[in-house]
Amino acid sequence: MTQISYYTKEGLQKLKDELHEMETVERPSISRQIAEARDKGDLSENAEYDAAKEAQGILEMRIAKLKNVIANARIIDDREIDASKALILSTVTIKNVKNNAEMTYQLVAENEANLKEKKISVESPIGKGLLGKKIGDIADIQTPNGIIQFEILNISR
């Protein structure tokens, strides 16, 4: 079963750049390591060779997985997003009802989430709780410390 993932144009480009780096820099580097280890003689007791072959296997698995993600990626056009509801790519300002703390986050795909950039995944508890809500709605978010209520103050693209 293929899973479609949604990305911003920048997010998808980041994945493509990562794939390019793996294929053009990391793969040749590992191939050189294997060749150097092979040149040292007996492969049956050559730890360098075994480690390089294992690294090669892991890299090839990562490349295959990333190619699959890219093949099933779709770019989201933020011009088509309904700004009246919290949806993927929406920037949402919320207020904790209990302590009045305000926060602003952009809802993004799982692979683009970055808390330092205030981008949270739509798969996260907060992201899931905000999806589909409108300004003025109260979102009940299940956290490890119990349910926290957030009021939606603003939604923008």
Image (tube, rainbow, N blue to C red):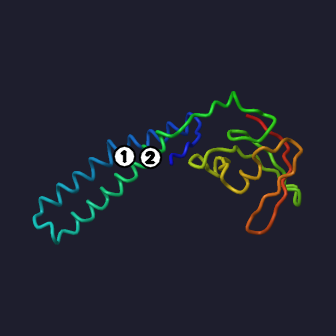
Q: Where does residue 19 sit, x and y in percent of width and height?
A: 41, 43
Residue 22's mark? 1
Residues at marks 2 and 1 touching, judged by CB atoms closer than 8 Å:
yes
Q: Secondary structure at mark 1?
A: helix
Q: Residue at x 54, y 46 (%)?
A: 3
Tell me the residue at 82%/51% (across/down): 102
- Residue 147 is situated, as x and y percent measured from the top left of the image, at 81, 64
| 80 up-or-down from 129: above or below | above
Label 1 Cα crowd, 10 Å radius (few <14 / some 14-19 / many 20+) = some
Q: Give whichever of discs 2 and 1 has the lower sequence position.
A: 1
On the image, numbered disc 2 is attached to which residue?
A: 66
* CA distance for labels 2 and 1: 10 Å
> In the picture provided, is 143 more to the left or to the right than 25?
right
x and y percent of residue 15 in the render? 48, 42
What residue occupies the far left of the structure in this picture? Answer: 41
Residue lying at the far bottom in this picture: please name it. 45
Q: Nearer the viewer, residue 39 or 65?
A: 65
Q: Which amino acid type corresponds to the residue marked 1 in the rendered image?
A: Met
Residue 94, placed above or below residue 99: above
Instruction: Answer with the quarter of the image where residue 136 lies.
Output: top right
- What residue type is disc 2 on? Leu
What residue sits 79% from the left and 39% below the top?
A: 85
Is label 2 in a helix, a strand or a loop? helix
Residue ranking furthest to the top: 79
Choose between 35 and 123: the one closer to the eye.
Answer: 123
